[in-house]
Amino acid sequence: MPAQEWEDSFGTLLARLRRAAGLTQEQLADRAELSVRAISSLECGSRHPRRLTLDRLAAALDLTGAQRTGLRSAAAHGRRRTVPVGALLPIAGPAGPLVGRRTELAELHAHLTGNGSAVLSYDGEAGIGKSRLLAEAIALGTRIGMPVLAGVGRRDSDPYSPLAAALADHVRRTPPSALAAMLRGCAGLELLLPELHPAVRGRSRVAEASPDPAAPSERSRSRFVAEASTDPGNRGSTAPQDRRLMFEAVGRFLDNIAGTGRLLLVLDDLHWAGPDTAELVAYLVRRCWPYLRVVTACRTGDVVPGTPLALCAADLARLHLVRGRRLAPLTPPEADALITATAGEATLSDSARARIARLSGGLPLFLVELTRATLDRQAVQEQAINTQTVNTQTVDGRAVDGRAAEPGSTVAGQAVPWHLRMAVVHQLSALPEPVVLLLRRMALAGPTVSVGQLATDERDAELVLDKLDAARRYRILDETRYGFRFRYPLVREILATGMGPNRRRLWRSGSADVRHAPVRTA
């Protein structure tokens, strides 16, 4: 059964109409002869309107005939639509073909269906295929009937992201009736998801009326959370208690979602997570590992030893609760298969295939994007031939070659999309500026560069090796017995072509000491 997203289109439309009329929820409640709680429940989607309620709202808002029809239609039909879980994973377009990775797929299937470590973490450079494997994990978990929660980390994101994003996404996908059952005993969850405050408070009131002996503790917990979350003066004095209460509530929420089965939690770009997220994820893994299966992805070099995320991962590894998998580039046969799958029915020459394979170095992102760029260039050329377009055209009074590429859009005879070039520059920007300057010098020196070509004495060699180690940690360089080489030739070519001809001529002549040149970024 495909994953569904609960979309409160009626609540969104009602709130927009109310704001357009310049009314608060209290004022609309007075005009419609409804309670403020009813208006709030309608707008947040936890309550479905009856026909009499719709008529009262339409009259109170003084809606036109078209607006009344739209409001009724939203209440009747605009509630559910199919959206794949994890649709926000950073994959360019729909998930493309998955080529190779047989070992990783077998390990992933065993991780979701068997016992062992609770966390499977993929590590690798940008474009190696981490997000594609996470998409496969989501598809596999959905096929075997596991509830799936998925979130993506962002730079400078909110606290507890991407875990909070995964929980919020699940809440949006869940009908209010089913969500009410999942929120039983979860008082404190609204500290992480403030939009759940009315729903959690409502479940707590039901618990107060229950003869269950646990009701008094639930009642006191709910009252404490309501006071702590609404009174700004309490935030400083009750922060530790809020944190403990929230952690426990998230654990109980996962218990309720999983039921008697298993639950899959997918977190992409976890390297952007802050210390709060690392501690919450570690707590959930220790608490829920018998049924919780977590699949994460981190970018190589961005998880620095000694940071909270690295320390939490080390603690879980000592408990045998996490297993890491470093992804490698595709082999030449796998790279050729991915080029074929990306091209589809289109035809690529052997020389084009060889050029794409050489520049990409087996990196799936480079393989796919270079193949698409080549196909686009072929399509433009074929269209020009079929329409008998002349080579030169007049644009704004200037002669322009219709087949000419944009400046810098080709590298070593291969078309390179602008966004791919920017992705490489962005990856290099994570390095210190002196390291980038040294990489630019290496790009002009040749495919493989020895330390002796970059240093003049032993002391200088130590400084050069420190810089090269930083690039090697990000898997931009590989170290061989002959020296250092760029892991992906496309990165070297982009660095080399990114410099002006005068600087290239100066550096190649050897008359400039780049060790003391002004620091520049890629």
Image (tube, rainbow, N blue to C red):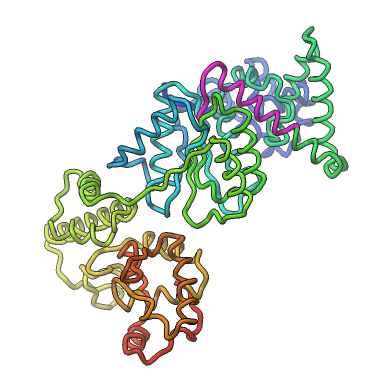
From the viewer's side, name the closer residue of 12 and 231.
Answer: 231
Q: Is 438 positioned to the left or the right of 292 in the image? A: left
x and y percentages locating residue 326 in the rendered image: 41, 47
Q: Which residues are magenta?
A: 245-265
Can residue 9 be seen here? The reply is no
How many labels, in total?
Answer: 0
Which quadrant of the figure contains the N terminus? top left
From the viewer's side, name the closer residue of 116 and 140.
Answer: 116
x and y percentages locating residue 167 in the rendered image: 59, 33
Seen in the picture, residue 173 relative to 380 is either above or below; the reply is above
Residue 48 is drawn in which quadrant?
top right
Can residue 511 be seen here? The reply is yes
x and y percentages locating residue 494 in the rendered image: 34, 69
Q: Taken as a whole, is the magenta stretch helix, strand or loop?
A: helix
Q: Is 386 positioned to the left or the right of 337 in the image? A: left
Q: Is residue 325 magenta?
A: no
From the viewer's side, name the closer residue of 493 and 45.
Answer: 493
Seen in the picture, residue 333 relative to 145 is either above or below; the reply is below
Give the residue displayed 39% in from the left and 75% down from the top: 440
x and y percentages locating residue 320 in the rendered image: 53, 36
